[in-house]
Image (cartoon, rainbow, N blue to C red):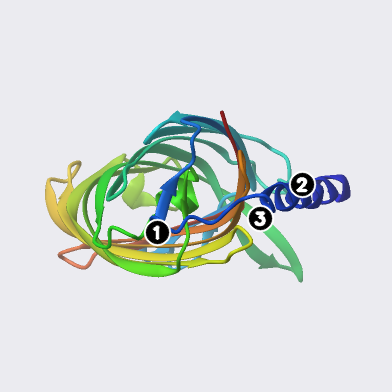
Amino acid sequence: MKIFLISLWLLAGLLWAEAQGMVASTDSVVTAFPEKFFIQFYAQYNYAAFSGESTDNKDLKTNLPVHIGFGGGYGPFSWTSMLSMSFGADEDLPITKAANLQFNYFSDRIFGDAEIGVNDGFYKRERFEEKDKAEAYQLMIIKGSLSINYIWNKDHSLRAVYNMDRRQWKSNGSFILGIGAYYHGIESKDSALSFYSEMQSFVHAGPSAGYSYNWIWDNGMFGNLLIVGTTSVGKNVTRNEWMQFYQIFPKGVLGYHSHTWSINFPLILSLLWIHENDGKVGDFFLEASAGFTITKRF
């Protein structure tokens, strides 16, 4: 871990040194890097929890802290493949199996993504005879999403801070409007979660709205805070019942641009509230990740 941190600081120092020759643009608030093709390396620490009426309000958590993966893109298109790794997992707890595949699109005013992911294996901690005891649950959650969003301010670039193939030169903010379609499949082979003993498939769609602000510094540093929420309507396909779904997607990032290298440190949250009309089910699914992304442009 010490070697990893030292290497990361050395990389940041090299990026800072390289950026000293960069000349700020006065022609446009947002400019493009000349390189079109880029590759990326990801490392993320992950957390997921499921709770609600079906679990008697007890948090079920995953034990798969680290995802690593590679991505790349050309122009506005990018892709990400995250691989499950046991590094950092607590050997005394049940191991979670997980995978994630994501495709992103960034233009100057529109951004969207398509994502498929799965978390298989949750646990909860119990106090038993003055000792902590981990109880495994055979719970699997599958998710899929497709969304597209519009940036109201043409001089505000999320592409510059997340995709990192643009550079924004001045701080500003923008309202975000969008629409999305989502799928969540939840199944448990554990008798303690009887509602999900059969795979419950939730399909829902609806509009989204939010606000984003970019902080820009002359030395190549940048930061962003983005909060988007959505209220969607859909069905529990398994039970043929209409439902409401509420989601919020806060994001934050700090990063740095040089000539052909960029690095950012994103923190991403996602909270889903599954709410049945009859009030029998009110469950929450929380996901969080924090890590870094290194981008090399060619």
Q: Are marks 2 and 3 in contact (CB under 8 Å)?
A: no
How far is disc 1 from disc 2 in space, using C-alphas?
26 Å
Circles 3 and 1 in contact, beta carbons < 8 Å: no
* Relative side of 236 to 40, left or right: left
Residue located beneath label 1 in the image:
29
Q: Is residue 245 visible?
A: no
Indicate the secondary structure of the residue bearing disc 2. Answer: helix
Question: Quick one: SS at disc 3?
Answer: strand
Write down the quadrant of residue 145 in the picture. top left
Kind of residue indicated by mark 1: Val
Please, what is the three-letter code of the amino acid marked with disc 3? Ala
The residue indicated by pointer 3 is 134
* Disc on the earlier residue, 3 or 1: 1
Dot 2 crowding, Cα within 10 Å, few <14, some 14–19, many 20+: few
Give left or right: position of 3 versus 228. Answer: right
Mark positioned earlier in the residue sequence (1 or 2): 2
Provide residue 227's location: percent of width, then percent of height.
37, 66
- Kind of residue at disc 2: Leu
**On screen, residue 104 above or below 246:** above
Residue that mark 2 sits on: 14
Q: Is residue 153 left or right of residue 291?
A: left
Give me the residue at 36% from left, 69% from top: 173
Toward the right, the furthest residue is 2
Task: Please tell me which residue is depicted at 79% across the width and 52% down the height of the picture.
Answer: 9
